[in-house]
Amino acid sequence: MSILVDNVSKSYQTKTHLSVVRNLTLEVLTGELFVLVGASGSGKSTLLRLIAGLVNVDQGRIWLHGRDVTDLPVQQRNTGFVFQNYSLFRHMTVAENIAFALSIRQVSRQERERRTDELLNLIGLDGYGDRMPSELSGGQQQRVALARALAHEPEVLLLDEPFGALDAKIRVQLRQTLREIQQRLNLTTILVTHDQDEAFELADRIGIIEQGNLLEIGVPSALYRRPQDRFTATFLGSANMLNGERNGNKVYLNYQHEQVTLKAPPNTEHLSGRQVDIFSRPEEIELALTPDGIRGQLIGTGIVQSATFAGPLERVLVQLSAPGKDSPDPITLQVVLTADEAREKGINPGQQVWVGLKDFHLLARTES
Amino acid sequence: MRELRIRTPLQALLLALVLGYAGILLLAPMVAITQGALGSGLGKLIEALLTPDVIDAFELTFLLAFGAVIINTIAGIALAWVLVRHNFPGKNVVNALVDAPFSFSPVIIGYALILLFGRNGWLQPANFQIAFAWPGMLLATIFVSLPFVTREVQPVLADLTREQEEAAFTLGASRWRTFRRIILPQIWSGLLYGIVLTFARSVGEFGAVAVVGGSIERQTETATVFVFRAMDDRNLIGAYGVSVTLGLLSIAILVVMSLLRRRPAR
Amino acid sequence: MTDISLPSAKAPLNGDARPVPRPQAAWGAWSLRFAALSYLAVFIAVPLLAIGVEGLGGGLETFVTSITRPAALNAVWLSVWTAAVMTVINTVMGTLTAYVLTMYKFPGKAVFNALVDLPFAIPTLVTGVMLVLLYGPQTAIGGFFEKQLGFRILFAPPGIVLALLFVSYPFVLRMVQPVLQELEANQEEAAHTLGATPWTTFRRVIFPAIRPAVISGALISFGRALGEFGSIVVVAGNIPMRSQTAAVYVYGQVEGGNMQSASGVSLVLLAIAFSITLGVDFFLRRRHA
């Protein structure tokens, strides 16, 4: 494997907050595009900087391609790093920026020019060599930053929220560009972001990080549909949680005054006899006007609170009639239907509906 | 703001007032001294300027100025760096202290140096004379021109993002190389401006070097101190001649300053 | 880049200070810090200390005696009131000059803009010599004033004010100019469309915006003028009790070997000047917070 972060800890105080990474262990495979997702202050950028060597570990080791680089300075780690913004050398041209790493390594001028042209072509900016960074748009600057990071053929590519400062459309384009380049070069890459769409689109695997802890790692679909951790479930998209208990091969959905019996999903035997969260995504909830209309497992009735237009989808909030076990507040479920479906079924605010689960997953309930 | 042409009589009056004031205040004296210096003819003037006293004085002035420039450039960059990039308790006080030389009367500076390095001074080393000799004068010159490099470098350094430095590190550049190829080129215009100001201030210093140097003829006499003595000795042509020379030097410095100021920051 | 190096409103302190990454670099950072700070300490704190000890070393009573001697009191007072008069005139003229330079186009403007920095570049002593040459009693102008109007320019307080005006000219001007330039043209135009006369516009739109810079510039030039030496020593005649400023008084005391009184008056001057500069710095920082 290409990158090994071995039980690394780091703690320091910046002007605004305490930045922490706690006993974090992570392996990234060769050629993999690994995306580290977390909220601001979760420690994701710190971890990236630890790998690059811009910050020193308090404890633990870091290995790149089998080399223990923990005590090596930044300059010797042979990584490529792309910052969120303002990292191009403003007094140098695009070509000089890209060739910088080569000029330090005493590569001949001819070779530098050749490589620069090659990279300009790779990022789609042929002919831009003589421009200054101030003449480029944000997206173009980031492309140059990427090319610059690749010039010295690093073993590992690290990107710290590289598209965060850009417009939505540009972001989408650049994600594509990055993916293509990364795959073409088979370059081991870690990208840090708080944008889950970006994570889903780019990642071979995703790591969820929160308060310095690596909570969960998995392929995007697995993390989305079968998260092991409550934080992951709620962070990577909307989540509906219902109080439940698993026993035998049944799951009991507990409302305040009643109980609904559901069939336990496969691979949840390890939760037998335990309190669980019944977890479902908005698209896994079914609405119908009659109980027969529910094809999945029926869980009760409710009233539509709101229906919001969202292009091809309709976002619906449904308040369940039965109050939940944990608190006197009514349970509101987030549901997503296709626009057609919503229209067919006549889903409107105030509408009484029957609610069912097409699919669901179980999470161990932790005592808070 | 957009610039307007002069349209109303009131505007014309205002302009005339300002230009007239500046003219009388600044230009008239320059004209007067040029007249005074050339009063006995150019030949006599040059003769007066080429005396050993004058040459020694200018030599000392420039040596002190260059010394101050070198030391204040290095220390000034370091100070600016520490103030812009580091956080530490008392930083605000340090920042205010950088401006302290503006508060000191030059005589007081010279006096303090004598207290420290004079015959019974606190820090007087046994075999190396500081007061009443050029080292003391150098210290005084360094002091009065201390703030300029720091103050001019601070804003351009702050504009230089940390990311650029870090990017250079990740690309393999050592700290020194990063300083030379990334930082220095970008602070260069501010730095140069600060150096020019430092030089101008050093050449023009009088009170502090007069006091700490003891104004000993041909030994601790800078160009300005020479002028003072020449006025006293009624060597008017010497005084006016050196003054005009210093004035011309000032104008040259002014020209360099305004050229630098107009250069667009990259 | 600031036009001229004045205790700058914009001296930024907030660059992105982050913890220093590497162990050896952390050591490097500390030694840099140490070097930079000791440089400051040596050149500023130590001299201050020396004067302080010398002046107060003989006890508080001796200190008070030395500064209340008539010649000393007179000198300090002369410094203060001439600096004050100069500051008033200079503030007005400096602001007007900044206004003219920012607002109007006129032939020779670029030259004028460079010329106003002359007092920064020219040695103060040379200034004094020039003024003697122009306004001394033997000259046409000086003679006229003295004989016809009984008003002595040089070797008297008016000469001091004149010299101070020269050397302080750029201070207010260069502090106000950038602020005026940054003021949006729209504000002035908006005021006009709402019916404000140029004077009202100046009074209620422009002046409030430049007021901090004007005040800072005034205070700085005042503080600097208190300590001015080179231009005054030639121009003032230095007659004790009549035309001797505090700085010249100190000079005389040092030359005469009276360290005690030299220190005493120095401390007073320093105290005034320091509190002004620190006050200005604090004032500016509050405004820019």
Image: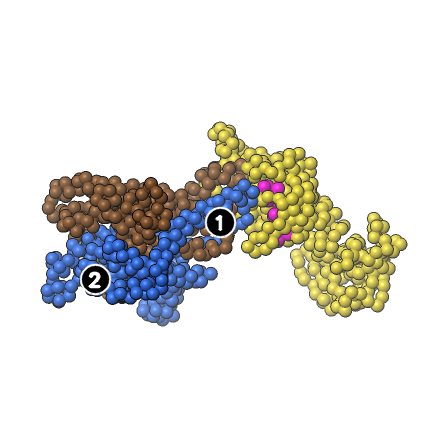
Q: Nearer the viewer, mark 2 or mark 1?
A: 2
**Residue A214 image position (x, y, % from top left):** 69, 48
Look at label 1 and name its amino acid: Arg
Q: Magenta segment range?
A: A41-53
How is the structure coloured here?
A: by chain
- Observer-nearest of A24 and A270: A24
Task: Report the Cα–Cα distance between label 2 and label 1.
Answer: 50 Å
Look at label 2 and name its amino acid: Pro
The disc at residue B85 is 1
Q: In the figure, residue C83 lies in which quadrant?
A: bottom left
The disc at residue C240 is 2
**Residue A137 image position (x, y, % from top left):** 50, 47
The residue that appears at 21% across and 40% down in the rendered structure is B55
Q: Which secondary structure lies at badge 2?
A: loop
* Residue lying at the far right of the rendered structure: A248
| Residue A354 colored in magenta in the image | no
Q: In the figure, residue C109 lies in which quadrant?
A: bottom left
The residue that appears at 70% across and 63% down in the rendered structure is A307
Magenta region, mostly helix, strand or loop? helix
**Residue C148 image position (x, y, % from top left):** 10, 66
Q: Is residue A40 visible?
A: yes
Task: State left or right for residue C28 relative to residue C86.
Answer: right
Q: Chain of mark 2?
A: C
Chain shown brown: that is B
Chain A hue? Answer: yellow
- Observer-nearest of A67 and A167: A67
- Observer-nearest of A292 and C234: C234
Q: Which secondary structure lies at badge 1?
A: helix
Q: Is residue A196 visible?
A: no
Looking at the rendered structure, whether the residues under marks 2 and 1 are on a common chain is answered as no
Would you call the spot at circle 2 few (<14 residues within 10 Å), some (14-19), or many (20 or more)?
some
Chain C hue? Answer: blue
